[in-house]
Image (cartoon, rainbow, N blue to C red):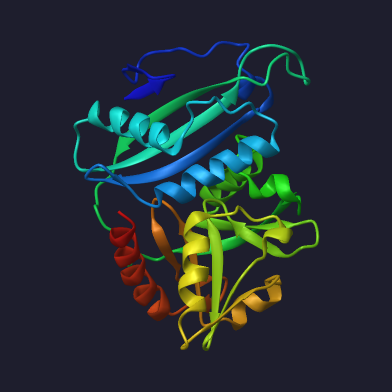
Amino acid sequence: MINLNGELYGDNHYFLNQNNRGFRYGDSLFETLRVVNGHIYFLEEHYLRLMASMRILRMEIPMNFTMDFFEEEIIKTIQGNVNGPAHRVRFSVYRNNGGLYTPKTNEISYVIEAKSLQSTFYVLGDATYEVELFKDFYVNPDMLSNLKTNNKILNVVAGIYSQENDYQNCLLLNQDKQVVEAINGNVFLVSGNIIKTPPLKDGCIDGIIRKKLISMLKDDENFVIKEESISPFGLQKADEMFITNTISGIISVTNYRKKEFSTEIAKKMVGRLNALARIAI
């Protein structure tokens, strides 16, 4: 089911044309949200991130674009999709048609898509999950890389490389050759009681689950959480590696080259994340 500016359409309805700025220039932002039994996980965080990103890109935020409106439009779209209690929602915002690189207007439109999910909980998989470095192209270490924009061609090419070489994911590097993130989420490394994740200044996505885990770990006296640059040389020294995103929650990495990782901390974190998600709703 698709919601275009408040009107619901079927998945087979085509409404974008060759002048769409999201298509022409990647002039678009999106939020991917998890919705279970009509409750949006971490609603406020997603809404505030989208509003902040729109301001950075100089998009005009409509007066009615409140958090209540954001929630209502998502729920309306979910109700049009009756396949199960759990959904993956993509809320896309793009600048309206007109202009070349410089737009004629900063007014926006939005599209909401809803797809069913199998599980109502975050579940840690137990299958082999091998990653490798992607070194053909690099992430820029700047604020634009922190935003969830439609400019994801690097991730697309990395995904193809991963598929061609039978990896489950790839780790993206910035121009300083530091590990930034995975194709589809933020990266955490565990070494003893120290847990590291790349800082925003290195170019990683400002992930919602990343923020939640950092906050959670800061309050846990059993761990020390550090936002520090991660060198590829440090990957094989770590005890554990996991990837985070809104839909999957936590994904345990089992293998990187000759290194086999534990999944002990990820198992603890996914339980706490489920509890946090339920509290949030």
Q: Nearer the viewer, residue 253 or 45?
A: 45
Residue 124 makes an appearance in the image: no
Q: Position of residue 127 (x, y in %)?
A: 35, 65
Seen at 34% across and 57% down, the residue is 280
Residue 4 makes an appearance in the image: yes
Seen at 76% across and 54% down, the residue is 141
- In the rendered structure, the answer to whether residue 60 lies left or right of residue 84 reads right
Q: Nearer the viewer, residue 262 or 99?
A: 99
Seen at 57% across and 39% down, the residue is 51
Q: Quadrant of residue 257?
A: bottom right
Q: Position of residue 237 (x, y in %)?
A: 61, 83
Q: Position of residue 187 (x, y in %)?
A: 56, 64
Dividing the image into 4 quarters, which one contains the N terminus? top left
Q: Nearer the viewer, residue 30 or 187?
A: 30
Above or below 63: residue 135 = below
Q: Nearer the viewer, residue 235 or 249?
A: 249
- In the rendered structure, the answer to whether residue 277 lies left or right of residue 103 reads left
- In the rendered structure, the answer to whether residue 216 lies left or right of residue 236 reads left
Above or below 239: residue 109 = above
